[in-house]
């Protein structure tokens, strides 16, 4: 995800860049949906694996936030805003995974991720 974020153009807004940065986490599962669904179902039903996912997510959060702070140098975007955006983006992925597991894989994971990001896109919360 860090590599994907580094590849995004500087002109792109932060939320869009994050949406593209999480794509590798989605693609990894979508490439083999049956295995991906089985893995996520196992993680969702095993407290130790669920906890490990959140531990791992914390390292992703720190790395992505550091990159965004660099990217935002000279802008008005504060560190707390960057951290909040990263947490929201990773939350969108988790919510999409959750919906995908609940649907038994009937819905397309990528569509669920897009829907989650769209729900928090600037201007959608009123």
Image (cartoon, rainbow, N blue to C red):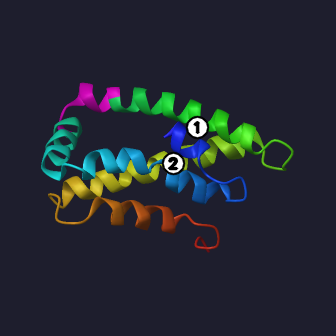
Tell me the chief SS of the magenta region.
Answer: helix
Residue nearer the viewer, 91 or 70: 70
Q: Which residue is mark 2?
A: 21
Looking at the rendering, the stretch of residues picked out in magenta corresponds to: 45-52
Residue 106's mark? none
Count of all numbered marks drawn on residues in the image: 2
* Residue displayed at 18% across by 39% down: 39
Residue nearer the viewer, 94 or 31: 31
Residue 64's mark? 1
What is the crowding at mark 1: few (fewer than 14 residues within 10 Å), some, or many (at least 20)? many
- Decide if residue 52 is on the left or right side of residue 43: right
* Residue displayed at 29% across by 59% down: 109
Magenta region includes residue 49? yes
What is the crowding at mark 2: few (fewer than 14 residues within 10 Å), some, or many (at least 20)? many
The answer to whether 4 is drawn above or below residue 112 in the figure is: above
The alpha-carbon separation of the residues under discs 1 and 2 comes to 9 Å
């Amino acid at each position: 995800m860090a590599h994907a974020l580094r590849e995004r153009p500087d002109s792109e807004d932060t939320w869009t860049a994050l949406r593209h940065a999480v794509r590798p986490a989605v693609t990894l599962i979508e490439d083999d949906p049956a295995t991906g669904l089985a893995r996520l179902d196992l993680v969702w039903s095993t407290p130790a694996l669920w906890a490990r996912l959140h531990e791992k997510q914390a390292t992703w959060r720190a790395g992505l936030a550091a990159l965004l702070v660099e990217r935002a140098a000279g802008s008005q975007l504060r560190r707390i805003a960057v951290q909040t955006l990263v947490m929201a983006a990773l939350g969108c992925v988790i919510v999409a995974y959750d919906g995908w597991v609940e649907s038994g894989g009937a819905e397309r994971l990528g569509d669920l991720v897009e829907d989650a990001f769209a729900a928090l896109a600037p201007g959608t919360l009123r």
